[in-house]
Amino acid sequence: MCQEPSLWERVVAFHGHECLGLAIGMRVSEAALQALGSRRAPDEELFAIVENDSCAVDAIQFVTGCTLGKGNLFFRDYGRQVYSFGRRDNGQAVRVRLKPLGEDKEYSRLRERVQAGVASRDERERFADLGKAQQERFFGLALADVCQVEKIELTFPGKARIFASVACARCGERVMEPRARVRDGQIVCIPCSDEYQRRW
């Protein structure tokens, strides 16, 4: 008899590999859903604002149901481990910040070597072992030791809208009307617009 995969196993299958970033997204999602008294959003009941584009975001999408395609995941390129979540039905919102976990110097040194493509086989294996140990430690900690959650006042983003499409006069591809530009009196897509940017 087959055993149903755990939530973590399903998140890993969705993302493609195990890593600390994915574990972070899973714990952040748990903290947010718990604080909001909510569960996974089948539609736009919840929304998430993420401030980085790390592996954590894939876990957040899978666990909370907030996705780019549904229009309830908003990306702000601030490079911070900070995530805001809101419930549209009651107006509650929370901000979840990752608490500092302390840096493993050996792991950091090996990560640099692995990313630079100069790590030996032994170093890559040690790096993988240390990463696995970090994930296990991270999952073993209480949510309160991992995440700082605060209730916040937040202007809720609008729900997703479906816009009419227009054909680009240059490439012929369809473009969402609000993203279209005008160039030489013709409607064009952003890549074909060659927007003028003055450099100072």
Image: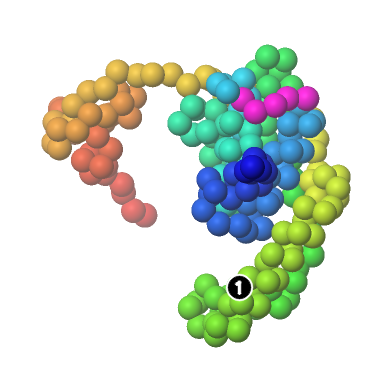
Q: Can the viewer see residue 187?
A: no
Task: Check disc 1: other Cα within 10 Å, few if <14, some if 14-19, many if 20+.
Answer: some
Q: Quadrant of residue 173?
A: top left
* Residue 113: image location, x then y, percent: 56, 79
Q: Is residue 163 above or below residue 142?
A: above
Task: Please give the residue where the numbered disc 1 appears in the rendered image.
Answer: 111
Magenta stretch, residue numbers: 37-41
Q: Secondary structure at mark 1?
A: helix
Quadrant position of the N terminus in the picture: top right
Residue 74 located within the stretch drawn in magenta: no
Q: Residue at x 14, y 33 (%)?
A: 172
Query: Main structural element of the magenta stretch: helix, strand or loop?
Result: loop
Q: Quadrant of residue 151?
A: top right
Q: Can the viewer see residue 62?
A: yes
* Residue 169: image location, x then y, percent: 14, 31
Q: Residue at x 73, y 25 (%)?
A: 38
Residue 39 located within the stretch drawn in magenta: yes
* Residue 40: image location, x then y, percent: 65, 28
